[in-house]
Image: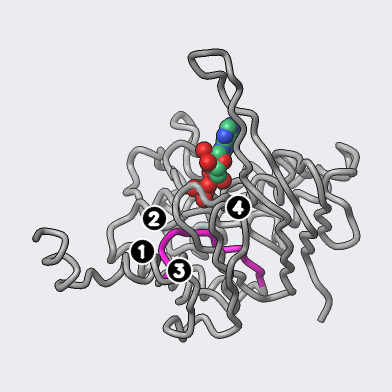
């Protein structure tokens, strides 16, 4: 099967805020990163905070430009494309981010929120929009009646379901999910992960699932990449077997899951 997305030798440096004495600091957020995603697969990307995950997400979605390297989605170069091509591409390439609430217009009803992409992309008859609205809400485990509610009337987990429904509206091929379950309670996280997994099968979706939670990534991913300070330091085709990971950055993510009581005791002593 062909590759849906190919990232080749991509680097990105931010020249950040000037410091007190006028010296501009620069941060190398990504260093020569290469990866690919096949149709129907979930590629997990894990790493500590600051390792460059969100930068990678933004570059893939065309929200920022790389300093070097290339990103191809289908047969299109994401950063050489015209605005018209990017508009067309966005149908097939969607993103959902961590903060479920911020992405939702507080004055818009849920039904309108989830069908907004359809209104932006084509002319649909009112009856068609109505049917799609119900379909989208049901596909993420909400009810048709929820379409009349405003974002603040939903729980955090439900708000993230709305964001997912909206991302699904245009029947995309690939969804970039950046820390989408991270701010939720553990029980809600599990249910969202199960939903993502079943949507993937149902619609033949591909995901890039970005998180600092290596366990969540292992649950959903077909392949897993570990990032550290802007570099890919390890990858595995067997994400369920996390103990096979050996890089210190991977071990650190694993240690974060299971606090070792002897280590805690040692630190106290
Ligand atoms: P992650 O998502 O893995 O936590 P990010 O991609 O957000 O990591 O950040 C990677 C590095 O780039 C960090 O050191 C961060 O401070 C820096 N960075 C990210 N965005 C910017 C920006 N707009 N300006 C300056 N530095 C940035
Ligand atoms: Mg991030």
Q: Secondary structure at mark 3?
A: helix
Q: To which residue does mark 1 refer?
A: 189
The quadrant holding residue 174 is: bottom right
Crowding at mark 1 (Cα within 10 Å: few <14, some 14-19, many 20+) = some
State the residue position of label 3: 248
Magenta region's main secondary structure? strand
Cβ atoms under marks 2 and 1 closer than 8 Å: yes
Which picture quadrant has residue 172? bottom right
Disc 1 and disc 4: Cα gap in Å? 27 Å
Please say whether residue 128 is visible from this viewpoint: no
Residue 47's mark? none
Residue 150: % across, % down: 40, 38
Q: Position of residue 132 (x, y in %)?
A: 62, 56
| Image mark count | 4
Mark closest to the chain's N terminus, 1 or 3: 1
N-terminal-most mark, 3 or 2? 2
Mark nearest the camera among 2 and 4 is 4
Which residue in the structure is indicated by mark 4? 230
Crowd around label 2: few <14 · some 14–19 · many ≥20 (10 Å): some
Secondary structure of the residue carrying numbered label 4? loop
CB atoms at circles 3 and 2 under 8 Å apart? Answer: no
Question: In the drawing, does residue 76 fall left or right of residue 19?
Answer: right
In the rendered structure, find residue 182 and report the number of the disc placed on it. 2
Picture coordinates of residue 112, whole percent (x, y): 55, 41
């Amino acid at each position: 099967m062909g590759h849906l997305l190919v990232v080749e030798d991509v680097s990105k440096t931010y020249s950040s805020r000037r410091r007190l004495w006028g010296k501009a600091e620069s941060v190398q957020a990504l260093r020569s990163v290469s990866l690919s995603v096949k149709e129907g697969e979930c590629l997990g990307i894990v790493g500590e905070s600051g390792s460059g995950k969100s930068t990678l997400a933004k570059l893939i979605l065309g929200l920022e430009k790389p300093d070097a390297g290339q990103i191809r989605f289908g047969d299109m170069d994401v950063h050489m494309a015209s605005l018209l091509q990017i508009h067309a591409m966005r149908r097939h390439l969607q993103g959902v981010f961590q903060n479920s609430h911020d992405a939702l217009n507080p004055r818009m009803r849920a039904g309108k929120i989830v069908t907004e992409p359809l209104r932006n992309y084509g002319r649909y008859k009112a009856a068609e929009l109505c049917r799609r609205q119900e379909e989208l809400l049901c596909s993420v485990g909400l009810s048709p009646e929820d379409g009349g509610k405003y974002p603040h009337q939903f729980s955090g987990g439900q708000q993230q379901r709305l964001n997912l429904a909206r991302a699904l509206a245009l029947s995309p091929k690939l969804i970039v999910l950046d820390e989408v379950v991270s701010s939720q309670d553990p029980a809600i996280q599990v249910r969202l992960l199960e939903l993502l997994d079943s949507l993937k099968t149902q619609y033949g979706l591909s995901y890039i699932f970005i998180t600092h939670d290596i366990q969540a990534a292992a649950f959903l991913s077909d392949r897993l990449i570990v990032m550290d300070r802007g570099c890919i330091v390890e990858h595995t085709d067997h994400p369920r077997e996390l103990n096979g990971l050996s890089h210190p950055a991977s071990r650190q993510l694993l240690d974060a899951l299971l606090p070792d009581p002897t280590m805690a005791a040692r630190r106290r002593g």
